[in-house]
């Protein structure tokens, strides 16, 4: 179920940038790498990613001691829409 807090998430820069960063690569990413790419702290990135996971937009996969993050099908669809909006705004 999408709440108002979930809706507000997409109109903040960092979560949108995270989805786009995950979309740009064909493989999954580590949380620390993603945090650096979107210029935020690791703990802030983890908080955002946990919310995205609750919404079914990303999944965490454990590879040994490390968790990698991948977009789900739904997450990819939303990243596509964010990218389209970004392109429209940039024109």
Image: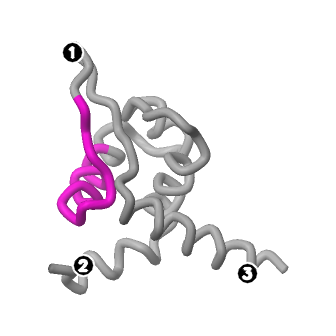
Q: Position of residue 55 (x, y in %)?
A: 23, 65
The extreme top residue here reads 64
Q: Residues within 10 Å of mark 2 (few under 14, many from 20)?
A: few
Q: Please report the residue visible at 47 percent of the width from the left and 58 percent of the height from the top.
A: 14
Q: Nearer the viewer, mark 2 or mark 1?
A: 1
Return the disc, 3 or 1, that comes first in the chain's sequence: 1
Gap in angstroms between the C-alphas marked 2 and 1? 31 Å
Q: Position of residue 1 (x, y in %)?
A: 15, 79
Q: Quadrant of residue 7?
A: bottom left
Give the side of residue 65 with respect to residue 90, left or right.
left
Q: Please report the residue visible at 33 percent of the width from the left and 31 percent of the height from the top.
A: 68
Give the side of residue 26 with respect to residue 6, left or right.
right
Mark 2 = which residue?
Answer: 5
- Asked whether 42 or 28 is in front, the reply is 28
Gap in angstroms between the C-alphas marked 3 and 1? 40 Å
Q: Quadrant of residue 26?
A: top right
- Secondary structure found at label 1: loop
**Which span of residues is magenta-colored?**
46-61
The extreme front residue here reads 73
Mark 1 = which residue?
Answer: 65
**Mark on residue 35?**
none
Q: Residues within 10 Å of mark 1 (few under 14, many from 20)?
A: few
Return the disc, 2 or 1, that comes first in the chain's sequence: 2
Mark 3 = which residue?
Answer: 89
Give the side of residue 84 with respect to residue 21, left or right.
right
């Amino acid at each position: 179920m999408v709440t108002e807090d979930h809706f507000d998430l997409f109109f903040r820069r960092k979560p949108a940038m995270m989805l786009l960063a995950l979309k740009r690569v064909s493989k999954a990413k580590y949380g620390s790498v993603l945090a650096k790419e979107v210029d935020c702290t690791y703990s802030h990135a983890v908080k955002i990613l946990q919310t995205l996971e609750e919404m079914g937009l990303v999944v965490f996969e454990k590879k040994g001691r490390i968790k990698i993050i991948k977009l789900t099908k739904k997450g990819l669809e939303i990243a596509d829409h964010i990218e389209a909006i970004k392109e429209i705004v940039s024109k």
